[in-house]
Image (spheres, rainbow, N blue to C red):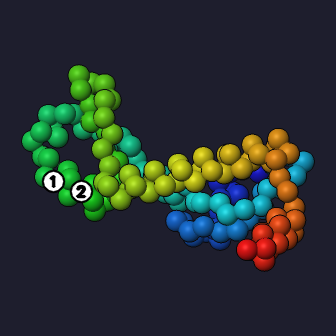
């Protein structure tokens, strides 16, 4: 299944929301909460590239624009991309998304390695542990 199609189906065309979903990865469906990582309209990165001299001359304007537009800015030095700037909210969201993706990857690896238990067994064990206190 195409990732974009799967993402749209999972979110019912709503960007930035999470939705419970099942996606077929080969022989078995994987169930869980998937986060939307794609935007409907991709940003034009070519408009978001500026030389370091522009940054030096327009720092306050750039900071304001980054906060309003929430799109990254690529800074070049000697014609080569050197730095990507983004507003703090976008950065924090990216970090949270990366952390959740790592958790999902770990969970998928544990499933592949057979390190899973039926939910009913786990719930039963937790209830028994609580009652024995």
The quadrant in which residue 131 appears is bottom right
Q: What label sits on residue 65 in the rendered view?
A: 2
Residue 133 rendering spot, x and y as whole percentages: 73, 74
Q: Is residue 108 left or right of residue 100?
A: right
Label 1 crowd bin: few (<14), some (14–19), many (20+), radius 10 Å: few
Name above or below for residue 6 compared with residue 109: below
The residue under the point 20% across, 53% down is 63
Q: In this view, which residue lies farthest toward the top?
A: 78
Secondary structure under the numbered disc 1 in the rendered image: helix
What percent of the width, then of the height, locates residue 27? Answer: 90, 48
Q: Is residue 56 above or below residue 62?
A: above
Q: Is residue 10 visible?
A: no
Q: Position of residue 64 (x, y in %)?
A: 20, 58
Q: Residue at x 54, y 50 (%)?
A: 99
Q: Is residue 20 left or right of residue 16?
A: right
Q: Is residue 98 left or right of residue 24?
A: left
**Residue 133 bears which disc, if any?**
none
Q: How many marks?
A: 2
Q: Is residue 51 left or right of residue 110?
A: left
Q: Quadrant of residue 78?
A: top left
Q: Residue tagged by mark 1?
A: 61
Query: Label 2: few (<14), some or many (≥20) within 10 Å?
Result: some
Q: Is the residue under label 1 in contact with that under label 2 (CB below 8 Å)?
A: yes
Q: Secondary structure at mark 2?
A: helix
Indicate whether 74 appears above or below 82.
below
Residue reaching furthest right?
A: 27
Residue farthest to the front, as pictured = 133
From the viewer's side, name the closer residue of 106 and 2.
106
Residue name at image x 31 percent, y 29 percent: 82
Residue 17 screen position, x and y as percent: 56, 68
């Amino acid at each position: 299944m195409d990732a974009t199609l799967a993402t749209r189906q999972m979110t019912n065309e709503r960007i930035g929301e999470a939705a419970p979903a099942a996606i077929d990865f080969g022989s078995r469906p994987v169930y869980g909460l998937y986060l939307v990582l794609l935007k409907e309209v991709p940003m034009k990165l070519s408009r978001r590239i500026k030389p370091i001299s522009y940054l030096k001359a327009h720092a306050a304007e750039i900071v304001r624009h980054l906060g309003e537009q929430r799109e990254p800015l690529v800074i070049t030095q000697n014609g080569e991309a050197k730095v990507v700037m983004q507003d703090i909210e976008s950065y924090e969201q990216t970090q949270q998304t990366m952390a959740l993706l790592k958790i999902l990857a770990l969970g998928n690896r544990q499933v592949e390695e057979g390190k899973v238990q039926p939910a009913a067994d786990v719930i039963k064990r937790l209830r028994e542990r609580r009652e024995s206190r």
